[in-house]
Amino acid sequence: MADISARKADHIDITTQRVVTPQVSPGWDDIHLIHQSLPEIDLQDVKLGVRLFGSDLRAPLVIASMTGGHPRAGEINRRLAQAAQEFGIAMGVGSQRAAIRNPDLMPTYSVAREHGPDVFLIANVGAPQLIDQDTEPALSVGDVKALVDAMGADALAIHLNYLQEVVQPEGDQRARGCLDAIRLVAASLNVPIIAKETGAGINRAQAQKLKDAGIRALDVGGAGGTSFALVESFRAADRHLGEAERLGQAFGGWGLPTAVSVVECLGLGVPVIATGGIRGGLDAAKALALGADLVGVARPMLSVAMFLVGATTIADLNMCERVVLGRTGEWLAQRGGSERPGLGRGRGPSPGVRILEQDPR
């Protein structure tokens, strides 16, 4: 268990001290909201509140699953929980496998509930750990239920981090049977399950399979934000593991850009959470305008953007007029085919979407 705890500490150090964002764009620069010169609402009319699985959030924001499993992580989760409590938003914790293997580490996660008694709290376990790996047996349903109960969690995220596992020298690289294991967990727990990618996005076909397996929400975790392939590449470099270092660098930008992945996951009847490269409220507004239900950050600029497009609620913002340019427009045009103008397959953003081949200026 010392290895897992040390790895958690490595992740904290690397993500805070090194450049782990790939060159690939998450796509927000290609999304343009259409300004309304006469919004016909007052700024004070803008309401950010949403409901998530029956719970009221004061804004459509989630503090994305980040850390746990190391003493330093406990302090981070404490502070994040206090912020989530104050602002009325949701929060996830990092992978809890370490706490299952070593219960002494559970306080680094459960501190979130202690300091966020009213927070919509999301527990977290990795999909690879739900099946037998070469060095460890699968976590049982009882194991997973125990960590949810110990957290007092309102939901469970099952993170899909196979890109990271492939690069990680000690990674779990077996995936056969993972979907069936997810289905079993979803059928056995009494909290909703969120499928969470960790930097490579979720495509339409995979999203459908996850929904059919009992997943109740999709956190797209698209390319363009923190790349755990790059994180593991730095870890490998520090250990003079050249092959793993090169592999991580080669796949640092792998995956679907976040904006594309949001669109891919729409229309399945489950909430879509946009994470991956959202740097401020304007990015958040663009993600919501594409159709996401929740995002990962930044309240003040979100309110202003909603005012300027005449949207009083998040549902209004989902339907606002917007233009998609550049590489994101090309991605969506290719993925949508010719079945309908714009995004195809009869899914995704409302009729307000326009995809242009070039900037009209």
Image (cartoon, helix red, strand yellow):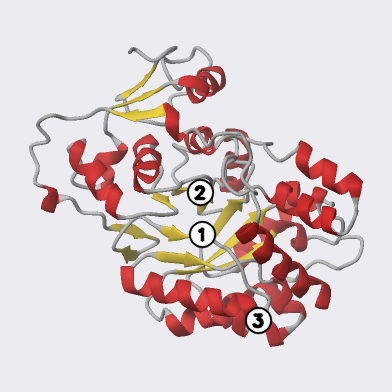
Q: Which residue is mark 3?
A: 71
Three-letter amino acid code at disc 1?
Answer: Ala
Neighbourhood count class around disc 2 (C-alpha, 10 Å): few under 14, some 14–19, many 20 upward = many
The reply to whether dot 3 and dot 1 touch (C-beta < 8 Å) is: no
Pair 3/1: label in front = 3
Residue 308 in sight in this render = yes
Quadrant of the rendering where the N terminus is positioned: bottom right
The reply to whether dot 2 and dot 1 touch (C-beta < 8 Å) is: yes
Q: Which residue is mark 2?
A: 275
Residue 184: x %, y % from top left: 68, 61
Q: Earlier in the sequence, mark 3 or mark 1?
A: 1
Q: Which residue is mark 1?
A: 64
Residue 177 in sight in this render = no
Residue 168: x %, y % from top left: 81, 54
Neighbourhood count class around disc 3 (C-alpha, 10 Å): few under 14, some 14–19, many 20 upward = some
Relative to 258, say whether 84 is above or below.
Answer: below
Three-letter amino acid code at disc 2?
Answer: Thr
Q: Secondary structure at mark 1?
A: loop
Relative to 199, say whether 192 is above or below.
Answer: below
Residue 344: x %, y % from top left: 47, 20
- Gap in angstroms between the C-alphas marked 2 and 1: 7 Å
- Gap in angstroms between the C-alphas marked 3 and 2: 26 Å
Neighbourhood count class around disc 1 (C-alpha, 10 Å): few under 14, some 14–19, many 20 upward = many
Q: Secondary structure at mark 3?
A: helix
Of the pair 308 and 239, the residue shown nearer to us: 239
Q: Secondary structure at mark 2?
A: loop
Residue ID at (47%, 66%): 91
Three-letter amino acid code at disc 3?
Answer: Pro
Residue ID at (90%, 52%): 241
Of the pair 261 and 35, the residue shown nearer to us: 35
Relative to 36, say whether 165 is above or below.
Answer: below
